[in-house]
Image: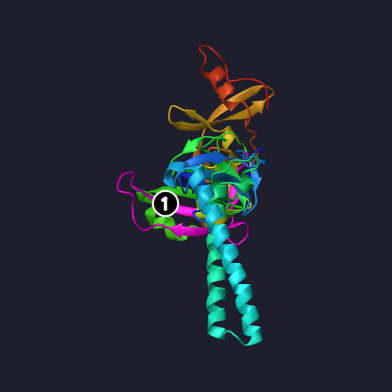
Amino acid sequence: MVQRKTLRASLPATGVLHAPSNAETTLTAPSAGIVIFPEQMPVVGHEVARGQLLASIVPRLAERGDMASLSEEARKTQLRHDLAHKEHDRAKMLLDSGVMAERQTLTAQTTHELTHAEMEAAQKRLNQYRQPADASGSGIPLKAPLAGIIAQSFVSNGRYVESGEKLFQVVDRGRLWLEARVPEADSAQLAQISGAAFKVDGYDDVFEIRPGENGRLVSLATVIDPVHRTLPVIFELDRPDPRLPLESFARVRLFTGQATEALAVPESALVDDNGLSVVFVQTGGESFERRLVKLGVRDSGFVEVKDGLAPTDRVVTQGAYLVYLAATAPGAAVHGHVH
């Protein structure tokens, strides 16, 4: 039945869903080397915690020499540290006996701490080139800078990568940006925008963003894109439906006016008849009448009918196009099954 509904004026636009600029990051290789995955391998779609180890990079030996040289350097720093440690202990003993000045003891302590730092650095450098089964003990660790999901993985375990090469994209799905593109001709109405609703291919649901409740208006552009002659409007949606894929195309309506009561039908009742909007009204049983309608505001899957229908009319909302095909067939009457 045709009925009166509360509708809001809106602007049609196209848009794209993507992660906020501060809710996604791409990890790159800090050095050329071999990628080693940990036991819990990073897989696209898996959730990761902030600071979780995703992989390690075992650098090329050519950058620092061979393993024998690294082992020799680590051993030398160990010996220097041991000697400095004994000198420090001896200096403390002489200080307690009053034989050595405090300044000399401080010098011995500083030497001990410096050699300890050199020993740790040499050992870490050596460990970077070892490749045990567990990557947590080798190489340069790569950890997730934020909590979220792995949106893309560009590498496989054991693969050689160059410095700066992309490894993983991590995205926080707790927020989502809808970037709508408004035609230049509608730019005067941007100041009136109060919310947005959008649909994505593959889903029947209409997703609405209500600033102050489940999202906010991020920005209204004031510079027109010289190529597409549009202005971007960005809304942020909190706790979005996890089914919504990033970078998907969206059909958007930007609400620009106060809500009004109007006679309305579902959008599925409309049929495009050579550029004209028509509906099919049930006249009795399985008989239908084609009606030309004048349309107005669209909102949440409904469209205002300014002329052509009365509140007592009953219209086809499912299979309207099949009724249209039957009506336009040569010699056919306008009838079909009631839906």
Whether 206 is among the magenta residues is yes
Rendered position, 159 above or below 325: below
The reply to whether residue 128 is visible in this rendering is yes
Residue visible at 61% across and 68% down?
A: 85
Give the residue furthest to the bottom. Answer: 98
Return the residue at label 1.
232
How far across and how far down the image is residue 73, in percent? Answer: 51, 53
Q: Is residue 231 left or right of residue 34?
A: left
Residue visible at 51% across and 43% down?
A: 67
Rendered position, 69 above or below 88: above
Could you tell me the amino acid type at mark 1? Pro
Rendered position, 144 above or below 202: below
- Quick one: quadrant of the N terminus? top right
The reply to whether residue 122 is visible in this rendering is no
Give the residue furthest to the top. Answer: 331
Front residue of this view, candidates 251 and 47: 47
- Category of crowding for the residue at label 1, using alpha-carbon neighbours closer than 10 angstroms: few (below 14), some (14–19), many (at least 20): many
Q: Secondary structure at mark 1?
A: strand
Give the residue furthest to the left. Answer: 226
- Count every numbered label the image shows and give the total: 1
Front residue of this view, candidates 103 and 330: 103
How far across and how far down the image is residue 3, in percent? Answer: 64, 43
How far across and how far down the image is residue 196, in percent? Answer: 54, 51
Whether 188 is among the magenta residues is no
Q: Which residues are magenta?
A: 205-234
How far across and how far down the image is residue 245, in percent? Answer: 57, 40
